[in-house]
Amino acid sequence: MNTTSATTTDEHQATLKTLAQTLGEGVFTQSRFRDNLRLHVPASRLIDLLRALRDQCGFKLLSEVGGTDYLGYPGRTGARFEVHYVLRNLETSEYLIIKTGVDDPDPTLPSVVPLWSGADWMEREVFDMYGIRFEGHPDLRRILMPPEFASFPLRKDYPLRGRGERHNFPRLLRGES
Amino acid sequence: MAANVLDEPEVEHEIQDATWTLNFGPQHPATHTTLRIVLELDGERIVKATPDIGYLHSGFEKLGEHLNFNQYVTIVDRKNYISPPMNEVAWHNAVETLLGVELTPRCKYIRVIISELARISDHLLCTGAAALDLGAFTAFLFAFNLREQIYDVYEEMSGYRFHPGYTRVGGLLYDFNDRVLDRVRGVVKSFQNVYADMEKLLFKNRIFLDRLRGVGVLSREEAIAHSCTGPIARASGVTYDLRKDKPYLVYPELDFDVPYCTDGDCWARFAVRMEEMRQSCRIIMQCIEKLPSGPFNAPIAEKFPIPDKATTYNSMEGLIQHFELIMPNRGLETPHDEVYAAIESPNGELGYYLVSDGSQTAWRVRTRPPSFIHFSVFPLLIKGHLIADIVAVLGSLSIIAAELDR
């Protein structure tokens, strides 16, 4: 289940070197845990980093996009929300996690749909659940929740049992249909 | 006035290029689950398909923030309910990666066996139901008969037929005994017959082939750009398989092949799934042969496995640990960190992004659901085809709405 950290360090050497050459130093910071290598990047350089990874380093597959709300997370100092992107290199089986922070009010990030069409629905889900807007997304609508839903259910200040929306959904009766 | 209507001169109608809209689902037998597609049609040809999902949204990810690592296994079962053990293995793989628990060899082999049984079960449903939707009813019955036998294995190993909830952090609910292994052998044996029957019924079936070949073509570039994984990507020529490329459990020690096609149509997806089942059988037979004896739970010193009943009642360490794990006001320290771990599920990469705040309940459980990602490709695949092809394409994608909406 767990690979040793020694092999993972070597695995990412070439990628990190290429990134330093393309983007220059200081664009992202790294952190490691188990076999994950995370690159933390500010929202302003997100697209540059992802494009460099896709075009120069061979990370062709965007495996996953997801958000996290860190409101009240113990020891948290950074931005409230973070969005992660998991990229895979299909040739070398290497994978990377890119993380970017975004804060209240009006959290907004650049959309990666121009780079990967697969990000379309995943970004819509992050918007639906956290209210993070993706600039440049072709069709940013709610995807799982109904369009008239007003809250963002995966935010930490949204209660588990909801705010009574379920009992107040508009109903279409048989006579009105 | 002409005596016959047919003799009347044809009236020049204004040519209408207006399209019409058809609602497909959410309750439709061919969707198998609850999903809705709004179709824009030109005659019978589909100009545009707009999926509308969320009918089965149950807040599974929110629940993951309120249930502990062992309790949540009952929820992951209900995501892809066609192959529950695979979800369990994926979930506890992520938890064990976070905690750094090393599994015992026996547990690893058992987990591979249940994963591959789940893969067979999932592919049987997908291929069988694809045949059913296209009118080949018999193949579906053969497939479902074998799925019943797989449910018997679940029942024998865990006591539950449909949602076994079989894995635990660092181990399993119960050990495999001889009766379970006999039943697994029985499944593998019956599979040969079922495969032969399905092959005879479908592989040279003219109607079936005509309905699948050249329909819903996904090119290699499109598959990668749309984040496709698993059999759908492999049918388009992407040979990526996490079992080979990012091996977990004991897959490096097993001998199996990863089938792929380059056509990318519905037939290719069907063929890849059929071949994957045969490979799964090979894996299961090797695992049964190599299955080591020894404990199935990680040692108590690892702190996270729930001790079995005998250990709990007969040893002080077992009792203390059981108390620590079960009592709500107790609990063990977990790393204050986050991890992404994925496995190869029947439909593709099934991953969990797990954030822990140091307690026994996750701060955030993000599922990477293959059904969700594959359904987003559907409008692309169906464009320009006929209404009748919808069931062929949907059947080849194997969309499970519970996983789609979570």
Image (cartoon, coloured by chain):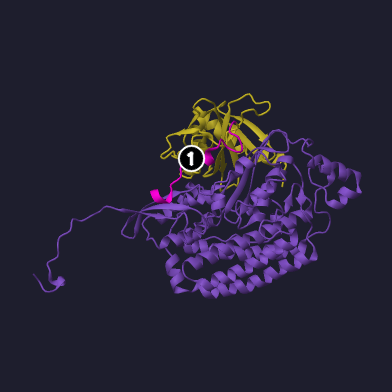
Q: Nearer the viewer, residue A22 or B213?
A: B213
**Magenta includes A168?**
yes
Expressed as whole percent of the image width and height from the top left, the position of residue B12 reads: 15, 60
- Name which residue lies at 54% across and 48% down: B405
**Chain B is shown in which shade?**
purple
Q: Colour of chain A?
A: yellow
**Magenta part of the chain:** A157-177
Left/right placement of residue B94 relative to residue A167 reads right
Q: Quadrant of residue A12?
A: top right
The 10 Å Cα crowd at callout 1, few under 14, some 14 to 19, many 20 or more, is: many
Instruction: Reply above or below: A101 against A122.
Output: above
Amino acid type for the residue under numbered disc 1: Arg
Q: Is residue A177 visible?
A: no
Q: Position of residue A69 (x, y in %)?
A: 59, 32
Outermost residue, left direction?
B1
Q: Main secondary structure of the magenta part?
A: loop
Q: Is residue B308 magenta?
A: no
Residue visible at 68% across and 51% down in the picture:
B88
Which of the pair B58/A82 is nearer the observer?
A: B58
Question: Which residue corresponds to mark 1?
Answer: A124
